[in-house]
Image: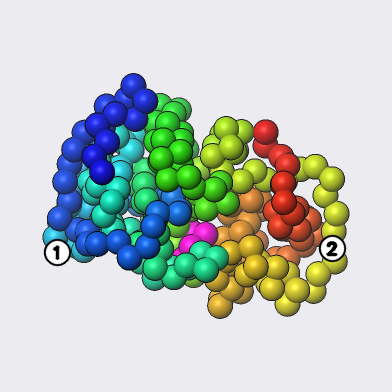
Amino acid sequence: MTVDFIGDRPVTACPSPNFDARALPVSMIVLHYTGMVDGPTAIARLCDPAARVSAHYVVEEDGAVLRLVDEDKRAWHAGLSHWRDTDDVNSASIGIEIVNPGHEFGYRPFPDAQIASVIELVASVKQRHAITRGNIVGHSDIAPARKRDPGELFPWSALARLRLALPRPTHNLMDPGWTQSGFLLALERFGYDVTEPMAAIMAFQRRFRPDLIDGEIDAECRMILLALLLPRPRGDE
């Protein structure tokens, strides 16, 4: 599949050789930050056959969108990862890299123009593949022991208000009083790999409670997770 425009926004072809055939239909979108010193360095790596990494799209800080791999191909962006019933996340997902130096090179807020492009791109991909908002996730959600991107500064609420991601629940919250093992069981049911419990808890907090990422299970975390497991979590809208 070739996409030359996202809405009225042009998409520039920048082909990467790093892809192969899908084994699953597309059911997810995974958002990343590039985590390198600048955009050109990241793009060069994503197109380097020796690196063996890629993504379907890159969104630059000025909002420009590049297509590296066609959507019908399996890009190599997720690595060892898991979400819900899927282990081959690369086969089931569209990967979007968002240019940002990340935690290692000076993590900073994402510019408005960049987020506007991310929103248009996510909306287009979501509609094209009938992806549920619960399957629009960050790299840290699918690989909590390895990754922190797109990180606590990413404005998930802006996507949630447009029904492009799950919101942080804020309405009718109740504390189920789960034990730690009960919380982890619920977290696994929601979709996370809880093999490394602390990492999974912090990934959940980074996504849904980014103001406090301490790895501690408290009443607020329990209330948020319970609400997310209900049919219609409300908040951020």
In the image, 175: left or right of 187? right
Vertical relation: 6 (above or below) 99: above
Quadrant housing the C terminus: top right
- What label sits on residue 19 in the rendered view? none
Q: The N terminus appears in which quarter of the rendering?
A: top left
Label 1 packing within 10 angstroms: few (<14), some (14-19), many (20+) = few
Which residues are drawn in magenta?
140-144
Give percent across and percent down for residue 21. 24, 62
Question: Where residue 156 sits in the image (x, y, percent)?
Answer: 56, 41
Residue pointed to by mark 2: 176
Classify residue 222 as left or right of residue 48.
right
Q: Which residue is nearer to you in this view: 105 or 60? A: 60
Name the residue tied to disc 1.
50
Q: Kindly identify the amino acid type of the residue bearing the numbered disc 2.
A: Pro
Label 2 residue SS: loop
Question: What residue lies at 52% left-to-right and 68% top-to-bottom?
Answer: 85
